[in-house]
């Protein structure tokens, strides 16, 4: 009988954590585990490592809004201007209140 295991990552971009997570996913999915990958925010075209995840691994996104994804990517890459940082803070506050209510 297969055991279930889930991995969580906030954003699945290109980096060392993501590369290490891919190895864990490959090892567990090949060794009698049903693997689920939970990603906090869908980053669309910036998720260049998604094609390396085995096809039988289930992927769940918590947030798929493209506007917030765009802001998060800009924030993550340190490209937000001051006005956009304020807008981002307001958007995140509204989204948190919506999902936590």
Image (cartoon, rainbow, N blue to C red):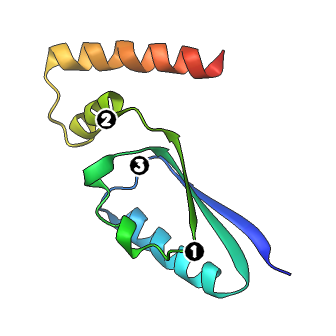
Give the spatial CA distance, label 3 vs label 1: 20 Å
Q: Which disc, if any, is residue 72?
A: 2
Which residue in the structure is indicated by mark 3?
A: 11
Within-10-Å neighbours for mark 1: few <14, some 14–19, many 20+: few
Q: Position of residue 19 (x, y in %)?
A: 39, 71
Give the spatial CA distance, label 2 vs label 1: 28 Å
Mark 3 or mark 1: name the one nearer the start of the chain: 3
Q: Quadrant of the N terminus?
A: bottom right
Residue at the extreme front: 55
Q: Position of residue 74 (x, y in %)?
A: 21, 36
Which residue in the structure is indicated by mark 1?
A: 56
Give the spatial CA distance, label 2 vs label 3: 9 Å
- At 30% from the left edge and 28% from the top edge, which residue is drawn? 67
Mark 2 or mark 1: name the one nearer the start of the chain: 1
- At 41% from the left edge and 63% from the top edge, which residue is drawn? 17
Mark 2 or mark 3: name the one nearer the start of the chain: 3
Front residue of 35 and 88: 35
């Amino acid at each position: 009988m297969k055991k279930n295991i889930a991995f969580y990552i906030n954003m699945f971009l290109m980096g060392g954590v993501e590369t290490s997570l891919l190895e864990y996913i490959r090892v567990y999915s090949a060794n009698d585990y049903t693997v689920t990958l939970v990603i906090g925010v869908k980053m669309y075209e910036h998720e260049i490592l998604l094609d390396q995840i085995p096809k039988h691994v289930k992927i769940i996104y918590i947030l798929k809004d493209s506007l917030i994804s765009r802001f998060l990517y800009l924030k993550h890459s340190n490209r937000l201007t001051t006005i956009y940082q304020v807008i981002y803070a307001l958007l995140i506050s509204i989204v948190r209140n919506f999902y936590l209510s």
